Image: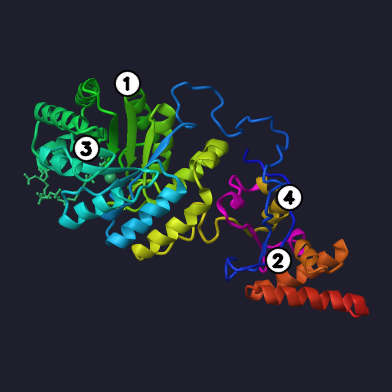
Amino acid sequence: MCDHNDPTPIQHVNGGAPDTHVAIDTSAPNHNGSNGVAKDNGNVGNVQPFASRYSDFLSNVSNFKIIESTLREGEQFANAFFDTETKIKIAKALDKFGVDCIELTSPAASEQSRKDCEAICKLGLKTKVITHIRCHMDDARIAVETGVDGVDVVMGTSKFLREFSHGKDMTYITKTAIEVIQFVKSKGIEIRFSTEDSFRSDLVDLLSIYQAVDKVGVNRVGIADTVGVANPRQVYDLVRTLRGVVGCDIECHFHNDTGCAIANAYTALEAGATHVDTSVLGIGERNGIPSLGGFIARMYTADREYVMSKYNLKALREVENLVAEAVQIQVPFNNYVTGYCAFTHKAGIHAKAILANPSTYEIIRPEDFGMSRYVSIGHRLTGWNAVKSRCEQLELTLTEDQVKEVTAKIKKLADVREQTMEDVDSILRNYARAIENGTA
Ligand SMILES: CC(=O)SCCNC(=O)CCNC(=O)[C@H](O)C(C)(C)COP(=O)(O)OP(=O)(O)OC[C@H]1O[C@@H](n2cnc3c(N)ncnc32)[C@H](O)[C@@H]1OP(=O)(O)O
Ligand SMILES: O=C(O)CCC(=O)C(=O)O
Ligand SMILES: [Zn+2]
């Protein structure tokens, strides 16, 4: 459960606290101080307090797979250049995190892409290795020789792509798709068929081609919001309709052009999709797709036990740092879970409640991801409860009135400029000494 009620042991500030804030690290090794199992705090047994209130038998929110596409969609990010060594490091880090599949750039893209695909297949990873190709026999022939476990095939079906990209009609697309599927299957390799730009494609065209490929035994069909136009309601409708038409698994791929990518992925699972595409930090073509960390945060909130049992959450930060360095970007300050201030509480009202019970203002337990919680106090929005907790850390014995008085001093100084941790500590120590000496 996400509720984490404990009398929070308070530790001293350590590295990792935001530099510009005075922050108390309040993270305990475990939320109940013992074995890592949180107290229920009024919630019963295994009930998921934030899960859907009505049961939906088609929902896969508690039973989904991640197709991690940093090494395919992510390579389409403007800054990405992954040499072989970097690709191998990323593949291993994703394997350590526990993603179900990794998707690699088409081996038809270049000679080095083909060699890298072969090299990654030979690593003996637990995760399945899939490559992504056009709906074309030439690409399929190259793909099946690389040693991959699966092939993801895509073909544009919207009017735009049929007219301006490949120029093929639905009859041709269906015929070629079936040919490619049968060929890949004949090699004993898993195969998925996806329509590019699904949300701007004709519904009858979509359902007809999905039905046709399902009939010839495709392992998965894919829906792709290639331009990020879809909203959750449209996603729910399309996936739910498709769920009634095909028996195979359903994968979903959402671009983030209009900010709906993670919500769309979650809704797709609610509607019965089985697989979701992610990339580390969301990198991809234009502004990318659901980030692995953001998607995981969403799913953790829906079913913490499933997510924690399946994925090594403490490995998230490592793979994000690795990818950020490889593509020369910073992890955003507001990144899901691992962002610089993802677990820093500042306003006095928040600080008081957080110190009493972290569930008041946190839906994610930082320690589940190997992160720490901070309460920031060296500013004008602080309150006496937060200051009292710092006094306790410093083992300064002050009455409630005295803490209130010294808090007023801190706020007055912080009205002029932000106070560092050293500033606050010396105000508190000087005040306590003056009280002791009777000079306050
Ligand atoms: C939405 C997505 O992200 S889909 C994945 C995108 N990934 C990539 O593009 C992988 C990297 N791409 C490449 O290295 C190259 O584009 C290649 C090797 C695939 C093709 O290169 P080229 O032969 O030089 O063609 P080019 O890139 O200029 O154009 C794409 C060709 O694929 C065709 N095509 C486009 N989409 C598809 C498709 N889904 N299935 C089959 N053919 C397609 C186009 O009609 C065009 O064919 P043409 O040569 O007859 O004009
Ligand atoms: O293969 C797919 O399903 C998705 C391809 C893709 O990257 C996209 O359509 O944006
Ligand atoms: Zn994409």
Q: CA distance from mark 2 to mark 3?
A: 53 Å
Q: Name the kind of residue labelled 4 in the image.
A: Gly
Q: Name the kind of residue labelled 3 in the image.
A: Val
Residue 380 to residue 76: above or below:
below
Crowding near the residue tagged with mark 4, few <14, some 14–19, many ≥20 C-alpha atoms within 10 Å: some
State the mark number for residue 33: 4
Q: Which is nearer the eye, 79 or 141?
A: 141
Q: Name the kind of residue labelled 1 in the image.
A: Gly
Q: CA distance from mark 4 to mark 3?
A: 49 Å
| Residue to which mark 3 is pinned | 153
Q: Earlier in the sequence, mark 4 or mark 3?
A: 4
| Residue to which mark 1 is pinned | 247
Question: CB at mark 3 closer than 8 A to ligand 2?
Answer: yes
Q: Position of residue 59 (x, y in %)?
A: 45, 26
* Residue at image point 46% right, 49% down: 97
User: Nearer the viewer's eye, disc 2 or disc 3?
Assistant: 3
Q: Earlier in the sequence, mark 1 or mark 2?
A: 2
Crowding near the residue tagged with mark 1, few <14, some 14–19, many ≥20 C-alpha atoms within 10 Å: some
Name the secondary structure under disc 1: loop
- Is residue 82 shown to the viewer in this render? no
Question: CB at mark 1 closer than 8 A to ligand 2?
Answer: no
**Residue 46's quadrant in the figure?**
top right
Name the secondary structure under disc 3: strand
Question: CB at mark 4 closer than 8 A to ligand 3?
Answer: no
| Residue to which mark 2 is pinned | 12
Q: CA distance from mark 1 to mark 2?
A: 55 Å
Q: CA distance from mark 1 to mark 3?
A: 18 Å
Please give left or right for residue 17 compared with residue 250 in the image.
right
- Is residue 70 shown to the viewer in this render? yes
